[in-house]
Amino acid sequence: MTENRAIRPRRRRILISGLQHRLLLVNLAYFCVIVLVLAVILVLPPLLQLRSASLDASAENLAAANEFLFLHARLWPAVLIVLGLLAYHSVIVSHRIAGPLYRFRRVFEAVTAGDLAARARIRKHDYLTPEADVINEMLGTLEDRIAGVEEQAAAIRAVFADLKRVRHGGSPDGLDESIRTLGVLVDSLQARLEQFRKP
């Protein structure tokens, strides 16, 4: 049986898949909607009051102007900071999902190419750890079953070689014994192959 080999891609990019781009765009769209709602709730009332008021310097007009200037000076810088933090957090969280998916894809490609020793190894803080464990368990079971089939095939080849020897000058008793052994091995091989068909 071959030694388990981890699929560890050599990459340093943070945004590695279209999934991350889509998640980032969705999060930014949500944030823009929240900002728009906040702007309507917080900025629109003093702005409407200023537009509808006369140009005199009444206390109400000054209060609305001060409120509008305060919101404009404090709200938008805070919104931009939160937007940057949200984008950064979205990239980090999506990377913990997209990274394992990227590794799973590499494992599937390796298995398609015939490498059953490939295993999915994900980082400590990545998501999808249970899924990686299930994939690795599946590959281990598959590798063990195929190793059993290979052992049975080797045993059948050995008995077949004995049959050839017996046919070319051996005793009939040896031939009967080899045929019986071959039948047992074929049945055993069939049972092993049935493991791949069980639901």
Image (cartoon, rainbow, N blue to C red):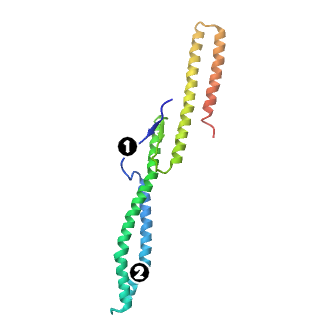
Q: In front: 119, or 188?
A: 119
**What's the amino acid at mark 2?**
Leu
Viewer-proximal residue among 193 and 139 = 139
Disc 2 element: helix
Kindly state the secondary structure of the residue where label 1 is placed. Answer: loop
The residues tagged by marks 1 and 2 sit, at their Cα atoms, a distance apart of 51 Å
Question: Counting other residues with Cα less than 10 Å from the Cα at mark 2, is it few (<14), some (14-19), or many (20 or more)?
Answer: few
Judging by the rendered image, the residue that carries numbered circle 2 is 44
x and y percentages locating residue 54 in the rendered image: 35, 92
Q: Which residue is mark 1?
A: 10
Q: Is residue 109 left or right of residue 183?
A: left
- With respect to residue 55, does 102 lie above or below? above
Q: Is residue 11 above or below residue 145?
A: below
Compared with 4, 66 (above or below) is below
Q: Position of residue 146 (x, y in %)?
A: 55, 31
Which quadrant of the figure contains the C terminus?
Answer: top right
Kindly identify the amino acid type of the residue bearing the numbered disc 1: Arg
* Residue at 45% over, 39% down: 6
* Res. 111 in view: no
Q: In the depicted view, which residue is nearer to us: 68 or 167?
A: 68
Q: Position of residue 119 (x, y in %)?
A: 48, 39
Q: Is residue 14 above or below residue 177?
A: below
Q: Examine the image and state in which quarter residue 155 appears.
A: top right
What residue is drawn where x is 55% and y is 22%? 154
> Which residue sits at x=37%, y=46%?
11
- Measuring from the top left, give residue 192's x and y in whole percent: 61, 30
